[in-house]
């Protein structure tokens, strides 16, 4: 049971915590949706909070508790380092605010569960931002799978060949640490892990190898995972942040009995191959679904917020709530467990892993 819907005509007030790199995508998306209103921002670094406050003409804070106490809001966006999302989300939930958490929602299952529980207990929604699910080519692919166009799916592959130089990791001390971030699977490629389990899952077991070859970070800069799906299909995920000299590919490929699709580009933004045995009107939409986003973050935050609005008005279910966000986290933690132990790891995980 969540709190009462926010009536039509009443703008939905958003506060944002963590004015770093991704906050701009939130500010832009909120500004484009008239039903939303950014009401306050907070960052522990005062210059960042001040700059974001000035740029968006809203009050700014360096104390989260102060922001929640001083400025009424309906939802709080959590855009702080990943390992802090649960504790920051729980504070918002206890203050009666809906929670919009950047991905990943947490970096341990225990913390993810505590966040889900706090939102349930306080009757607020928990949204986990997975904007790549809303890329137009991915929407078409999901529909093709749901409509059974592939027949039996045999193979699924995700490939993330990106570049993150050392100075990217050096920008903030939390990056690449086990305590606050994780590596290429948990941070940069987490959308791709999410897509493969959402489109072809559930995953039955995973084997993985990871390596830290060229970046001075605790977690991995590269890795490969082999998946066995409950359906019998098998899959692979290949991830690296070491591609020379720039981002080369962010793709997903599905091979089935009656269809083959590859969505590629640098961030699943382009249909590279689309072929089915049987015609469907969706085939006519393939060409126009290609997008050319300015960064690998894509355009999806706006679409994500449109769902948030519908949910808070009581008109829709969340695109990705806490329980959906937890699934990809569980698979990533399974990948890490396999890389650590050298074993095939069955899912669901034992929660204390
Ligand atoms: N959806 C996406 O595609 C996408 C893309 C990039 C980042 N992200 C996620 O967004 C989150 C932030 O990433 P980023 O690249 O913007 O990081 P960042 O380091 O640029 O920004 C984080 C901000 O949080 C602030 N902060 C840290 N601790 C705080 C605290 N206790 N209270 C208030 N502010 C605090 C920092 O000062 C910083 O300004 C990460 O979880 C990341 O995984 C998602």
Image (cartoon, rainbow, N blue to C red):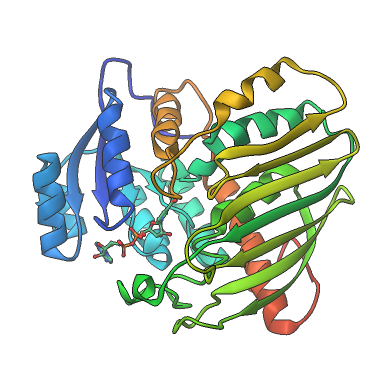
Quadrant in which residue 263 is drawn: top right
Q: Is residue 317 left or right of residue 293?
A: right
Vertical position of residue 185 compared to residue 118: above or below: below
Rendering coords of residue 262 (x, y %) = 70, 42
- Residue 297 in sight in this render: yes
Q: Quadrant of residue 19?
A: bottom left
- Between 34 and 119, the one nearer to me in the picture: 34
Residue toward you, 339 or 272? 272
| Residue 350 vertical placement versus 86 (above, below) | below
What x and y, as percent, mark residue 105? 47, 56
Q: Position of residue 259 (x, y in %)?
A: 83, 34
Looking at the image, which residue sits at the far front?
245
Q: Is residue 332 above or below residue 306?
A: below
**Could you tell me residue 119's position as x and y percent?**
44, 47
Q: Is residue 70 visible?
A: no
User: In the image, 262: left or right of 167?
Assistant: right
Question: Split into 4 quadrants, where in the image is the C terminus?
Answer: bottom right
Q: Which quarter of the frame holds ligand 1?
A: bottom left
Q: At 71% across and 21% down in the image, what residue appears?
A: 283
Q: Which residue: 90% across, 51% down?
A: 232
**Image side of residue 65 versus residue 296, left or right:** left
Q: How many marks?
A: 0
Question: In this view of the protein, which residue sits in the foreground, 308 or 65?
Answer: 308
Residue name at image x 80 percent, y 63 percent: 205
The residue lying at 16 percent from left, 59 percent from top is: 48
């Amino acid at each position: 049971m969540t709190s009462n819907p926010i009536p039509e005509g009443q703008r939905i007030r958003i506060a944002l915590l963590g004015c770093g790199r991704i906050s701009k995508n939130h500010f832009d998306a909120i500004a484009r949706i008239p039903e939303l209103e950014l009401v306050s921002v907070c960052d522990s670094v005062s210059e960042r909070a001040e700059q974001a406050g000035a740029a968006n003409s809203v009050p700014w804070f360096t104390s989260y508790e102060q922001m929640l106490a001083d400025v009424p809001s309906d939802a709080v966006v959590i855009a702080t380092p990943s390992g802090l999302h649960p504790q920051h989300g729980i504070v918002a939930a206890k203050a009666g605010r809906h929670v919009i958490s950047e991905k990943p929602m947490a970096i341990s299952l225990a913390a993810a569960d505590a966040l889900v529980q706090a939102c349930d207990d306080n009757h607020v929604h928990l949204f986990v931002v997975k904007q790549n699910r809303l890329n137009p080519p991915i929407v078409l692919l999901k529909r093709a799978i749901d409509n059974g166009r592939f027949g039996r799916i045999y193979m699924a592959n995700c490939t993330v060949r990106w570049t993150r130089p050392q100075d990217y990791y050096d920008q903030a001390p939390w990056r690449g640490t086990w305590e606050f971030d994780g590596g290429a699977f948990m941070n940069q490629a987490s959308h791709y892990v999410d897509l493969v389990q959402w489109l072809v899952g559930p995953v039955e077991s995973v084997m993985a190898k990871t390596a830290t070859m060229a970046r001075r970070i605790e977690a991995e800069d590269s890795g490969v995972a082999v998946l066995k799906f409950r359906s019998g299909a098998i899959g692979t995920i290949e991830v690296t942040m070491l591609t020379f000299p720039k981002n080369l590919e962010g793709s997903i490929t599905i091979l089935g009995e009656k269809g083959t699709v590859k969505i590629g580009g640098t961030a699943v933004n382009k249909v590279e191959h689309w072929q089915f045995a049987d015609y469907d009107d969706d085939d006519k939409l393939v060409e126009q679904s290609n997008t050319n986003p300015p960064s690998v973050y894509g355009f999806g935050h706006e679409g994500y917020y449109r769902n948030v609005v519908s949910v808070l008005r009581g008109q829709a279910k969340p695109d990705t709530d806490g329980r959906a966000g937890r699934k990809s986290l569980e698979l990533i933690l399974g990948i890490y467990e396999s890389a650590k132990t050298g074993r095939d790891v069955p899912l669901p995980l034992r929660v204390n892993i």
